Each structure stands twice: as C-alpha cells, then as structure tokens.
Image (cartoon, grey):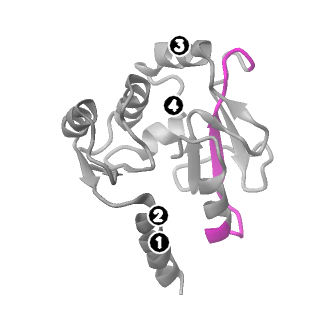
C-alpha cells in the first residue's frame, strides 16, 4: 500500500518485478468517477483485463497516484465521500479486504499526525492482524503515540533511507 502521489513505490515494484504480473489499484475521486471507488491497472499501466486476485502481487494506492493516468483524491469533497463510506469498507477493494485478513501492515514514510491519516489507516487495517509496524525516525507526537498504541503499531526508530537500504539489500539477497 502506498499513500503518496509520487511513483517511488511503483518504480521499486517495476525494478524488482520487471516481468510484470502485478496490479496497481488506485483510489478514484467520486466527482470524476461516481460510484467507482478504484481503478485496476496492470504492470504496463493499462486498465487490467482481469481483476487482481489474492495471488496477484498488488500495489494499493487508496488516495490515487500520478501514474499511469493521474487519479487523485485531493479535495475536501473527495475525502468526505471516502470517509463517509469507509466505515462500511465500500472504498476498499474486495481483494485488499480479503488479503489483509490476519496480516500486519508496515508503514513507511507515513506519519499519523493528522486525523485524516489515522482514519484511513484505522479502516484499512480493520480485520487484519493485531501486530503492525511503522518506520518513524522522530519521536511521535502525543496523538501519534496514542494511535500507535491503540492500533498495535510498533515504532521502528530509524530513517526511511536506512530502512530502504536494508530492505533493498535483503530483497537482492533473496533473489540472488
């Protein structure tokens, strides 16, 4: 899952899985795509011919992304629409709902210092495991610390760059 508009995670996925075989699910603005909460793209950036399954490697981008076509949730009305429905899980694709069952989340580059971020995270983690992790180099704010404790999120106190370097090394060793 990626909650930034840039293509960093997308580029990493293309580098580690150049043969494709993966999907990208992007959140859609209801003002532009009324009634359709996400778009499903294949590794080449085309609308997927077949939907992602539980076995499909997946990049879920609930607030949209720059690539392949620039879907963004940015306005207050976009977030009102999503947050109105997110309690009943409507904006979260079925494959993501199924995949999260019993699994933990690792949050990279994500602060929980505003209510919107905490609301999204809380609902996306719903019905997942009780253990999660977040790479947060700085001490969390009072509200972040409270959220981390409530949600069973263990803070990993290192910079994202250090974590990314260690993760890259581990992935390269795994594929060697």
* Residue at mark 2 to residue at mark 1: CA–CA distance: 6 Å
- What secondary structure is marked by label 2? helix
Which element carries disc 4, helix, strand or loop?
Answer: loop
According to the picture, the residue beneath numbered tag 2 turns out to be 161
* Cβ–Cβ under 8 Å for marks 4 and 2: no
Mark 4 or 2: the one toward you: 2
- Judge the density around disc 4: few (<14), some (14-19), many (≥20) Cα neighbours within 10 Å: many
Which residue bears the numbered disc 1? 165
Q: Circle 1: is it few (<14), some (14-19), or many (20+) Cα within 10 Å?
A: few
Which residues, given as a range, are shown in magenta? Answer: 15-32
Q: Foreground: 121 or 17?
A: 121
Question: Contact, CB < 8 Å: mark 3 with mark 4?
Answer: no
Label 2–label 1 contact, CB within 8 A: yes
SS for callout 1:
helix
Q: What is the C-alpha distance between the residues marked 1 and 3? A: 37 Å
Answer with mark 3 or mark 4, whichever residue precedes in sequence: 3
> Could you give the CA–CA distance between mark 4 and mark 2, rounded to whole angstroms?
29 Å
Image vertical order of residue 38 relative to residue 175, above or below: above
Q: Nearer the viewer, residue 143 or 39?
A: 143
Would you say the residues marked 2 and 3 are in contact, meaning their CB atoms lie under 8 Å apart?
no
Q: Left of 148 or right of it: where is 118?
A: right
Q: Main secondary structure of the magenta part?
A: loop
Looking at the image, tell me whether mark 2 or mark 3 is earlier in sequence order.
Answer: 3
Q: Secondary structure at mark 3?
A: helix
């Amino acid at each position: 899952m990626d909650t930034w508009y840039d293509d960093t995670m997308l580029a990493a996925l293309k580098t580690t899985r150049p043969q494709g075989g993966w999907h990208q699910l992007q959140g859609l603005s209801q003002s532009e795509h009324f009634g359709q909460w996400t778009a499903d793209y294949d590794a080449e950036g085309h609308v997927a011919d077949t939907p992602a399954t539980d076995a499909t490697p997946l990049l879920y981008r609930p607030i949209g992304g720059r690539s392949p076509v620039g879907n963004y949730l940015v306005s207050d009305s976009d977030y009102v629409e999503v947050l109105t429905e997110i309690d009943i899980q409507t904006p979260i694709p079925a494959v993501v709902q199924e995949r999260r069952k019993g699994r933990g989340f690792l949050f990279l580059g994500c602060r929980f210092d505003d209510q919107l971020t905490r609301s999204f995270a809380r609902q996306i983690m719903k019905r997942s495991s009780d253990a999660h992790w977040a790479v947060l180099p700085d001490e969390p704010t009072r509200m972040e610390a409270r959220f981390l404790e409530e949600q069973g999120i263990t803070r990993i106190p290192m910079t994202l760059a250090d974590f990314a370097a260690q993760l890259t090394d581990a992935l390269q060793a795994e594929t060697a």
